[in-house]
Amino acid sequence: MNIVVVGLSHKTASVDIRERLSIPEAKIESALAHLKAYPHIEEVAIISTCNRLEIYGVIKETEAGVTEITQFLSEISQITLTSLRRHLFILLHQDAVRHLMRVSAGLESLVLGEGQILAQVKHTHKLAQQHKSINRLLDRLFKQALTAGKRIRSETSIGTGAVSISSAAVELAHIKLENISNSRVAIVGAGKMARLLVQHLLAKGTSDITIINRSSTRIKELANQFPEAQLNACPLEGMLPALAQANLVFTSTAATEPILNRSMLEGVITSNVILIDIAVPRNVDADVQGLLMVQSFNVDDLKAVVAQNQESRRKIAQEAEALLEEEVETFDSWWSSLDTVPTISCLRSKMENIRAQELEKALSRLGTEFAGKHQEVIESLTRAIVNKILHEPTVQLRAQQDIEARKRCLQSLQMLFDLDTDSQYI
């Protein structure tokens, strides 16, 4: 079995391509089922965020499995394979393992060291478990990656002062406006990104903030997290009048189609407004760029802002790389040891059969009365002897780092004990 990741990110594709490959959580289950139905894919997990879509798979045959995943991506995006390939990256085996750990640690994020990605990787793992699309290999890999991400954040200062997409958006607004603290702000959406937007706006001294959302409950939940802020609430049907009163608008909803476009805003926007869309798929249609009083930005426009903060954390990232290599080695050692499992399992099974047969013979000779009194003690004794005999070979086999040497040891055991490992489940 081989581990592979096929995907694209802010490094390889613009937002208009990324949004076509974004998979909302409501469709993750069907996407996993679709991928699992391919003949060469044994396990699969999907990371889908505003800046990346990555499909991790355990596949029977590398070339065929990669072809099946790329075909799936072409189908869901309705982009031809020829056009799509130039945006994709494909990583195999140890490179795929290392990449997931880098993603979990925030080293592959638009904002170096950002913390939100760790929760997203954890959620990916949870969904894959819930929908039964992963087994032993990917389950262990994601657990190791989560351990790596937590370790990087606890043993380095990469996350200290690290900005998020939301704070980068607020920083962009701060650059574009003379005085953001006096701005009339509207935020469309009431999820995690909106919460971070409010947090960073308040830190800049902004107090006039209106939250626009379909669910009034979500607005109340958000407002309860900032009791000192007195956020204004607005239902979705009142969105356009609320936008007309604002000079700074952020959009961050899970909508799969734009919720704002040129025809909706024409005649509504009568004074200058900055519109910053941090959603993928985009909430704001590209055609608003032509409106006279609107300056429109999306997540790709945040790169220049983020670049100012990257250099100071790049040196810290080098420390993180060394720690990640330790986690990669830990996973590789475990992965390599899996080829010992069939032989060890088969040997233990054979020893157990011999133990049970000889115990039965011994008990029959001792007589019913003696056997009845002492069977438990004798049973425990024979099991302990077998376990002690098998302990050292098992430890030495699993600890053997040289692949060829381990193969020779396994072959010797199989020959000496006449083991049929083909019947063992791996």
Image: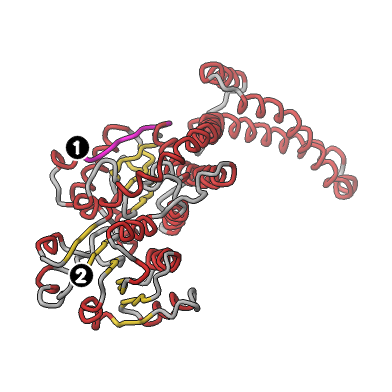
Instruction: Establish if 103 lies above or below 130.
Output: above
Identified at 13% across, 44% down, the residue is 80
**369 or 37: nearer the viewer:** 37
Residue 67 figure quarter: top left
- Is disc 2 placed on a helix, strand or loop? loop
Residue 277 falls left or right of residue 339: left
Q: What mark, if any, has residue 259 been given in the picture?
A: 2
Judging depth in this view, the residue of 346 and 397 nearest the camera is 397
Numbered disc 1: secondary structure: loop
- For the point 49% across and 51% down, the residue is 161
369 left or right, relative to 42: right
Question: Which residue type carries mark 1?
Answer: Arg
How far from the left and from the top, in percent, is residue 91? 34, 34
What residue appears at the point 64 percent right and 33 percent down from the top-left corner?
Answer: 348
**Is residue 86 in the magenta section?**
yes
Q: For the residue carrying disc 1, how many other residues have a C-alpha within 10 Å: few (<14), some (14-19), or many (20+)?
A: few
The residue carrying mark 1 is 86
- Count of number-bearing discs: 2
Residue type of the residue flagged with mark 2: Ile
Residue 284 x, y percent position in the rendering: 20, 64
Q: Which mark is residue 380?
A: none
Residue at image location 30% in from the left, 47% down from the top: 303
Q: Which residue range is magenta in the image?
A: 85-94
Q: Nearer the viewer, residue 179 or 214?
A: 179
Mark in the foreground, 2 or 1? 2
In which quadrant is the N terminus drawn? top left
Displayed quadrant of residue 178: bottom left
Q: How far across and how far down the image is residue 10, in percent?
A: 29, 46
